[in-house]
């Protein structure tokens, strides 16, 4: 008697976390790398290195994570954990994101309180701000490639990006206004372009 051949789809064949332990340590490692430039680290770890999600899935999940209350990367960890292990995966991924980094941040905060007035410490923190901005800009450029496959097309997506940048950086409008207005406009335009 021959055994049936199972055909796997590309989604089934791609890498995934094999256990809750692997999920926990992956998010712990991700969180420990994410000082100041977490977007770059998350995209590199989940999309490029582990390949648990595609670049397009990352853009969609990250967009959803940004509009939900709470830290973006914690929201994303909940989505990824839930995708592979349900509620247990969501809880384990959040624990990985928060447990060890929380202990480390408490220790760093105690050290910072002791040395905050030292000029070398202040200069180092200002320099790290520039590095964080560069990391975010680099990830933005990498993620822009997925906009070519967006239902609106590259030009409308570019215009929405420019409007958002001008509203936030030039006009300094609050995120609480920009997100519902520009984000709502983008969602409406995309919904109208999707096939019925």
Image (cartoon, grey):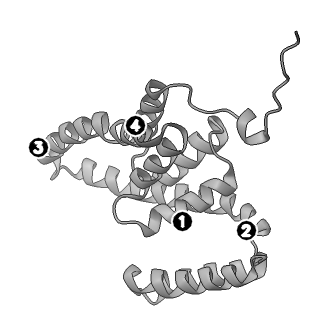
Mark 2: secondary structure: helix
State the residue lying farthest toward the right.
2
- Where residue 63 is drawn, which disc sits there? 1
Total count of labels: 4
CA–CA distance in space, label 2 to label 1: 13 Å
Residue 185 figure quarter: bottom right
Residue 156 lies, in percent from the top left, at 73, 83
Mark 4: secondary structure: helix
CA–CA distance in space, label 1 to label 3: 38 Å
Q: Residue at x 54, y 84 (%)?
A: 184
Q: Residue at x 54, y 55 (%)?
A: 135
| Residue bearing the label numbered 3 | 114
How many residues crowd around disc 1 within 10 Å: few (fewer than 14), some, or many (20 or more)?
some
Q: Earlier in the sequence, mark 4 or mark 3?
A: 4
Q: Earlier in the sequence, mark 2 or mark 4?
A: 4
CA–CA distance in space, label 4 to label 1: 23 Å
Eye-nearest disc, 1 or 3: 1
| Residue bearing the label numbered 4 | 88
Above or below residue 38? Residue 141 is below
Eye-nearest disc, 4 or 1: 4
Q: Earlier in the sequence, mark 4 or mark 1?
A: 1
């Amino acid at each position: 008697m021959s055994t049936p051949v199972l055909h796997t789809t590309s989604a089934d064949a791609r890498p995934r976390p094999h256990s809750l332990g692997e999920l926990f340590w992956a998010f712990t490692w991700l969180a420990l790398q994410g000082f100041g430039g977490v977007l770059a680290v998350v995209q590199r770890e989940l999309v490029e290195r582990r390949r648990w999600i595609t670049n397009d899935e990352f853009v969609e999940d990250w967009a959803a994570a940004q509009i939900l209350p709470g830290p973006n990367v914690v929201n994303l960890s909940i989505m990824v954990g839930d995708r592979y292990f349900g509620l247990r995966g969501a809880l384990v991924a959040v624990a990985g994101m928060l447990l060890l980094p929380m202990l480390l941040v408490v220790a760093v905060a105690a050290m910072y309180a002791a040395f905050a007035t030292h000029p070398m410490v202040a200069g180092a923190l200002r320099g790290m701000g520039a590095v964080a901005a560069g990391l975010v800009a680099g990830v933005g450029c990498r993620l822009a490639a997925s906009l070519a496959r967006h239902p609106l097309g590259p030009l409308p997506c570019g215009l929405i990006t420019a409007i958002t940048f001008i509203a936030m950086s030039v006009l300094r409008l609050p995120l609480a206004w920009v997100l519902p207005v520009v984000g709502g406009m983008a969602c409406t335009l995309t919904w109208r372009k999707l096939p019925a």
